[in-house]
Image (cartoon, rainbow, N blue to C red):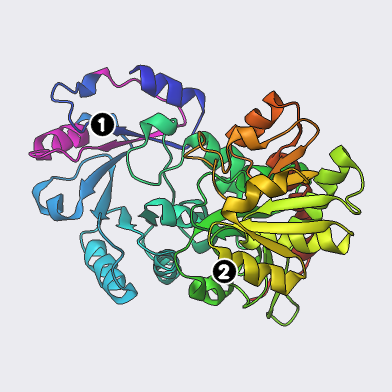
Amino acid sequence: MEKLQLALKEKPDFIELRADGIPDFDIKRIPKTGRTRLIFTCRSKNNIRLLQSAIDSGRFDYVDVAFEDMPHIKRGLPKIIASYHDFKETPSLAFLKRLHKQMAETRSDVIKIVTYANDILDNLKIFNLLKHTKDTIPTTAFCMGEAGLSSRVLYRRFGGWMSYASLNNAEGTAEGQLDYHEMKYNYQADKINNKTRVFGLIGNPVKYSLSPVLFNGLFKRYKMNAVYLPFLIHNIKVLPELMRALDIRALSVTMPFKEKVIRNSVVNTIYRDKKGGFICTNTDGRGAILALGASTGSVQDKQILILGAGGAGRAIAHELINNGARVTIANRHYDKAVKAARDLGCKAIQWHKIKETMKQTDILINATPVGMMPKPNAAPIPAKLLHKGLAVMDTIYRPPETKLLRQARAKVCRIISGLEMFINQAGLQFALFQKLATKAPRH
């Protein structure tokens, strides 16, 4: 009952009480909840008796009954939610439509269909199902799994009846479930409508990104009807379909896709033009220059060593060279460093020659993922290679102070957190997002 009281303090529209694994669950102890409606759910084996007791008690507004158990219960005062779960995949849209029709024949009051998203496009099947059924029986449908987050947040945009959230991060009942505060205050899911502009982040992984918190906070501050979502994708080829289906105005791009959007180019921002086409740009380099300038002043004629020849490293190198810096790139795969150096017009060195190069280096920039969450106790190079007076910048911002930066601090180096670069490049992106959010939506 303690958790119920905590949930009631949030004043949600619904609270689901789950009796799974509670053999002595006492329905008579359930208190009155005022305007908040109660849903009773039990997924345990031999749960029919408890479900029937919940129906007969009159203490609940809704009772959730598995589709296959519907013939075994007797209706009563509470409304019935007929539910279906697929914990392995999201079936075809044709299957989901047939399933919905069969579930409607039970004459339940609400239909609930929950599947598992193995791919970002599985969300589109759910959205299409909701659009297909929005003028029929109230329906809630979404995907479990990290890739299914957008279906949980955008439910109202497509006519979904409701969505689910946990009381807190530790209380989730399904993979990919967000907690109540994330849903209500970060994503503002209950305020989303068909005029809400959609922005987001594509990458793999995306769960550690601060971008959703930052951009959704800015949208809220500037009273913009917009939402920013993390999209976990496995293949860049899904991008056009995803952007058109959700009318996504712009996307931030993170690893490993910065170099895969356009061949021989590095992209961290994609947006749509007036005709619905796609335009690509990059704010990483400018964000890094701003962060470096605040700490080291001009980079003109500075000797700068960049660790990593991936998307971030190349974008930063390009901007530094344009600002007169003398750039050297090191990468564990030397051929990749050579290609980047040839494309950009700078030097490349083999990884084992970093020690020699560091003696003449003014600024060291880590553009590798080494030290990033969930492995924060790693550093790309040994601490002994750092020296007093060196400026050390890490492009990683989770954690804000990486092991490399802690080592640099101990060596009396100037340190520049990846958080500074992140905020700068995000500010440049947000200026673009503001312009795009004011345009009329495309349908």
Q: Secondary structure at mark 1?
A: loop
Residue 283 can be seen in this image: no
- Residue in the picture at 62% in, 33% down: 384
Numbered circle sitting on residue 335 = 2
Give the image location of residue 189, x and y in percent. Answer: 55, 48
Quarter of the picture containing the C terminus is bottom right
Pick whichever of labels 1 and 2 is earlier in the sequence.
1
Give the image location of residue 212, x and y in percent. Answer: 61, 47
Query: Does residue 295 lie above or below 144 as drawn?
Result: above
Span shown in magenta: 29-56
**Residue 322 located left or right of residue 118:** right
Q: Secondary structure at mark 2?
A: helix
Q: Amino acid at mark 1?
A: Gly
Count all numbered tags in the image, as a single digit: 2
Question: Looking at the image, is mark 1 or mark 2 nearer the viewer?
Answer: 2
Give the image location of residue 407, x and y in percent. Answer: 64, 30
Numbered circle sitting on residue 58 = 1
